[in-house]
Image (tube, grey):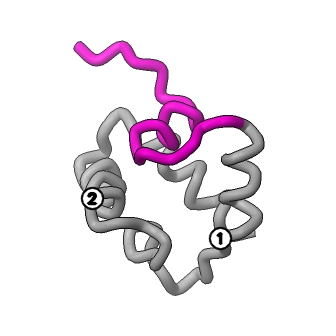
């Protein structure tokens, strides 16, 4: 059983991105996602990052809630 703490910081680490509060804030401020583009299709992801996000959503994985939160934050 996966008992990991699935936070925004943990998601950024899972995606291979810097997961400090400052780095996350900068990422959100520098990346806007229009409503018509699904999160996993954003141009700023690598193929592996996009695949992780796609699987998290499709499988309603443990990560889905925090991925949804990131999606909402990027649509500011």
Screen quadrant of the N terminus: top left
Q: Which mark is residue 59?
A: none
Residue 7 is covered by the magenta coloring: yes
26 over 40 or under it: above or below: above
Whichever of labels 1 and 2 marks the residue nearer the N terminus, that label is 1
Screen quadrant of the C terminus: bottom right
Horizontally, residue 37 falls left or right of residue 27, namely left
Residue depicted at x 30% and y 39%: 61
Q: Classify 10 Å Cα crowding around label 2: few (below 14), some (14-19), many (20 and above).
A: few
Query: What residue sits right under mark 1 in the picture?
Result: 31
33 over 53 or under it: above or below: below
The segment highlighted magenta reads: 1-20
Q: Nearer the viewer, residue 17 or 3?
A: 17
Q: Nearer the viewer, residue 57 or 47?
A: 47
Query: What residue sits right under mark 2 in the picture?
Result: 48
- Separation of residues labelled 1 and 2 (CA atoms): 18 Å
Q: Classify 10 Å Cα crowding around label 1: few (below 14), some (14-19), many (20 and above).
A: some
1 over 6 or under it: above or below: above
Relative image position of residue 56 (x, y in whole percent): 31, 48
Determine whether label 1 and label 2 are within 8 Å by CB: no
Residue depicted at x 69% and y 47%: 23
Relative image position of residue 72 (x, y in whole percent): 63, 60
Relative image position of residue 45 (x, y in whole percent): 42, 67
């Amino acid at each position: 059983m996966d008992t990991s703490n699935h936070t925004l910081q943990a998601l950024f680490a899972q995606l291979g991105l810097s997961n400090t509060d400052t780095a996350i804030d900068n990422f959100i401020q520098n990346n806007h996602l229009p409503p018509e583009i699904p999160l996993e299709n954003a141009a700023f992801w690598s193929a592996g990052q996009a695949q992780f996000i796609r699987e998290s959503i499709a499988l309603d994985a443990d990560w889905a809630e925090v991925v949804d939160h990131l999606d909402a934050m990027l649509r500011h």
